[in-house]
Amino acid sequence: MRVIGTAGHVDHGKTTLVSSLTGINPDRLKEEQEREMTIELGFAWLTLPSGEEVGIVDVPGHRDFIENMLAGIGGIDAALLVIAADEGVMPQTREHLAILDLLQIQSGIVVLTKIDLVDDPTWLDLVEADIRTVLRGTVLQDAPIVRVSSRTKAGFPDLLRTLDLLLQNVPARPDLARPRLPVDRVFTIAGFGTVVTGTLSDGTLEAGDEVEILPAGTRARIRGLQTHKQKETRAVPGSRTAVNLSGVDLEQVRRGDVIASPGQYRPSQRVDVRVRLLPGISAPLRHNTEVKLFIGATETLADVRLLGVETLEAGASGWLQLELRTPIVAVRGDRYILRRPSPGETLGGGTVVDPSPKRRHKRFDAAVIKGLESLAQGSPAEVLLQAAQALGPAPERDLLTRSRLEETAAKSALQELVDTGQVVRLEDVVIAAAQWSAIRDAMVTALAAYHQTYPLRRGMPREELKSKLKLPPRVFNLILPRLAQEGALVEAPKWAALPGHKVRFSPPQQVKADRLMGMFAAAPTAPPSVKECQAEAGEDVYAVLLEGGDLVQASAEVVFRRQDYEAMVEKVRQAITQKGPVTLAEVRDLLGTSRKYVQALLEYLDAEGVTVRMGEARKLK
């Protein structure tokens, strides 16, 4: 399925040509038909001699409606640059040609219309020579020129054959399994509800699919699909598609929105772009200039941040970061146009290099420019690496989506990066090597600082470390074992520590610890309480003995020395094994202690899964 678009000066016969070719009048509005001038985008279709169906987008030619033209021209496979034989090249011919060149519409035909109004063949030759001069250096410099009359249909067979041959050499739109339909028209049909149209790219849509309307994020479901007024169950990349949506009102969708599969695209209010300015613009492009951005079917105001230069002269190329007034959906490689809002003027255009940079760039940072150049011109591996560095730790699917590489090439490039150590892959999470090193260094620094502040604690609580590093829980839980495996830290269920960290008491603290442990030795089954321990040795020393396993705290008040606890547990096990379930009173007599200690011990054994209570007795679990 291919889509072609018209371009050219007002009243040069674009709409008449489309009507004559297809039998469909693309001018839908009453005002357009009364004024005989296209104002809004129009749509038609035809079948070529080869049998291929082609959609046609008819655009306004008047300079007052250039911005309507931009909403429809971005998604086409080829252009019909229409020039009237009796007038030749005119101002909007040049502007439309410049736009086609900026958008890199590589395929096209120059259609010389209204030849029935010219009696002198020499005049037509002169017009063609002038056209060739104007086309020089543009994407259409080698485009065929076909002479036609929409009134007599002279030249139509030649035009159709030429178009058929041209489209056979245009590569098919790839199916990247990430459907994206920029909405260029919204309307309602009685009994059906909201309908949107656009040119589908990057994937397929099917009736019944749930979709997301971006940038708002509204969910809807596809009630039905049509292509060229024929009902379809599936729309393919590159097709002009009408989508009947259920679950949304007309007011919830507008031109410039994008219909996509849920979760596949994220709107952005900042984009990094490569720009080329047109040679004849009225003034250089300056930092902080307000411009209009046209991308897909979207139009929004943006503020220009020039990178690496103070101003950009007419005809020059450079790097921009655009701060957008409203969010857009874009992917790496999308083409765009910039216009000056007032007075209206097309400034230039180019390619999106990074659709969602994380931060405002420093304007004169050489590393920023180098990174953008790598993204714009690099190999698949370089593109993926730059995407990984921009995203930070991220799921592999997000990395592949951001790179906009073909899936097989992207996965091969990712494996190359893993094999060469340029990225680290933890299950499905990918981290650039430089960021991996930074995370490891930050973790080591945080742990070292914690050990210095709390020398008597075995390690830093995991939750505290995660919060310190501002890492998502899943990423943190994947990173910690890997760093432990590499020997950068020691990991425990509740804490992490540096490998060389050991809790060491100062001489006064060691005296307190020894004195406390002596109190336990003197009364193994009736030890000092938690409060008495803390009062005797201090809270820090007590905490170290507890964390190190020297002490076992059975309840808020009762604590045992480790060897005494294990001895009591063994006696309880033997008693139950020999006699069957035992009561609290029996255990009290067995251990020769009071009810307070035995109750705390047995409840702790229940909690630890050693025993289980049955009425007034306990049995082994």
Image (tube, rainbow, N blue to C red):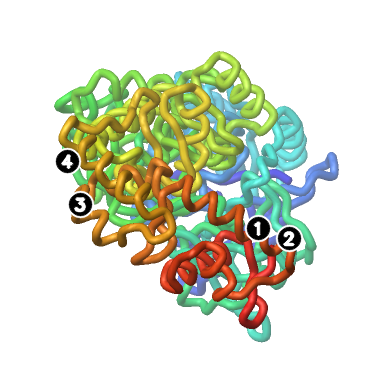
Of the two numbered discs 4 and 1 in the rendering, the one whose residue sits closer to the viewer: 1
| Extreme-bottom residue of the structure | 191
* Horizontal arrangement in the rendering, residue 69 relative to residue 517 (left or right): right
x and y percentages locating residue 500 in the rendered image: 36, 23
x and y percentages locating residue 25 in the rendered image: 63, 63
**Amino acid carrying mark 4 in the image:** Asn
Task: State the residue position of label 4.
Answer: 288
Task: State the residue position of label 2.
Answer: 577
**Amino acid carrying mark 1 in the image:** Arg
Asked whether the beta carbons under mark 1 and mark 2 sit within 8 Å of each other, the answer is yes
Answer few, some or many: residues within 10 Å of disc 3's Cα (few below 14, many 20 plus, some between 14 and 19).
Answer: some
Q: Earlier in the sequence, mark 4 or mark 1?
A: 4
Task: State the residue position of label 3.
Answer: 536
Asked whether the beta carbons under mark 3 and mark 1 sit within 8 Å of each other, the answer is no
Examine the rendering and report whether any part of residue 495 can be seen: yes
* Front in this rendered view, residue 424 or 141: 424
Secondary element under disc 3, as helix, strand or loop, is helix
Determine the CA span between mark 1 and mark 2: 6 Å
Residue 82 picture quarter: top right
* Horizontal arrangement in the rendering, residue 329 relative to residue 50 (left or right): left
Task: State the residue position of label 1.
Answer: 573
